[in-house]
Image (cartoon, rainbow, N blue to C red):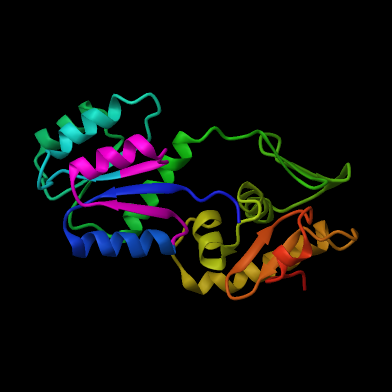
């Protein structure tokens, strides 16, 4: 299934914690919830998180002191502060202590998702070259080849293929592809993904016996090389 980004949500209000847990899991992240600062620090010391979402108003420790302790670790994940405190000095203090971003409650979930994506992208070394089987994508020169043969792609086709290859082995929904490649939250565009996948298949898979673009029923699409037993791709179909 590939690697899922892991997020720690530090939030004592159960309603908000549940809402974030459902929403983030739905967006494809693995999520742990810590209702207190102490629980958050215990988890942060045992698990390497890709991102921490931190509420400032916690029942035991102040969120800013939790932030300070997380920042003292060797491997430091990006931290996004979530708070009802809208005072400028709170915001400044949080950013001075090493928070990467600050979102004031109440917030729109889509805005939170957009900020999470930016922070996760910032924290990741972007490889210059992606490879799945004999398919190679050069992110810098924006060139694609398969078995050494160059393949011409339109910009959106390239964007979709790059996103699928970065998430090799992980099924991506049409909505995720639309939000990533078109940068829009628009369900009406999800049908267009099927059209682009058809184009990509005709250019990338048609002339080769080994198919790399798979349809995952009920979810969307994924790119994977069949170096795994057919049983693991049982739910995927290449049609």
Quadrant including the N terminus:
bottom right
| 177 sits to left or right of 146 | left
Image: 131 above or below 186: above
Kindly tell me whether residue 102 is visible in this rendering. Answer: no
Residue 126 placement (x, y as % from top left)? 57, 35
Q: Is residue 34 covered in magenta?
A: yes
Total labels drawn: 0
Quadrant including the C terminus:
bottom right
Residue 54 placement (x, y as % from top left)? 24, 44
In which quadrant of the rendered view does residue 181 lie?
bottom right
In which quadrant of the rendered view does residue 88 lie?
top left
Q: Residue at x 51, y 66 (%)?
A: 175
Looking at the rendering, the stretch of residues picked out in magenta corresponds to 27-52
Image: 238 above or below 76: below
Image: 234 above or below 107: below
| 63 sits to left or right of 150 | left
Residue 112 placement (x, y as % from top left)? 32, 53
Camera-side residue of 143 and 174: 174
Kindly tell me whether residue 134 is visible in this rendering. Answer: yes
Q: Residue at x 18, y 58 (%)?
A: 106
Q: Residue at x 60, y 61 (%)?
A: 171
Q: Is residue 164 covered in magenta?
A: no
| 106 sits to left or right of 220 | left
Residue 207 placement (x, y as % from top left)? 90, 60
| 175 sits to left or right of 67 | right
Camera-side residue of 113 and 142: 113
């Amino acid at each position: 299934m590939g690697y899922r980004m892991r997020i720690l949500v530090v939030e004592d209000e159960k309603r908000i914690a549940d809402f974030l847990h459902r929403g983030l899991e739905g967006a494809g992240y693995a999520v742990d919830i810590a209702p207190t600062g102490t629980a958050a620090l215990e988890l942060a010391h045992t698990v390497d998180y890709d991102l921490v979402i931190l509420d400032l108003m916690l029942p035991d420790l102040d969120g800013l002191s939790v932030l300070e302790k997380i920042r003292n670790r060797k491997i430091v994940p990006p931290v996004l502060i979530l708070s009802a405190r809208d005072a400028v000095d709170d915001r400044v203090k949080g950013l001075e202590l090493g928070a990467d971003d600050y979102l004031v409650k109440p917030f729109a979930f889509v805005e939170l998702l957009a900020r999470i994506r930016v922070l996760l992208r910032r924290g990741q070394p972007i490889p210059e070259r992606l490879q799945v089987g004999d398919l190679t994508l050069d992110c810098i020169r924006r060139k694609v080849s398969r078995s050494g043969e160059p393949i011409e792609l339109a910009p959106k086709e390239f964007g979709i293929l790059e996103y699928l290859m970065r998430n090799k082995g992980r099924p991506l929904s049409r909505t995720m592809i639309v939000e990533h490649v078109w940068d829009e939250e628009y369900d009406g565009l999800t049908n267009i993904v099927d059209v682009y996948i058809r184009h990509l298949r005709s250019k990338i898979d048609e002339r080769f016996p080994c198919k790399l673009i798979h349809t995952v029923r009920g979810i969307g699409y994924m790119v994977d090389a069949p170096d795994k037993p057919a049983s693991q791709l049982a739910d995927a179909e290449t049609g």
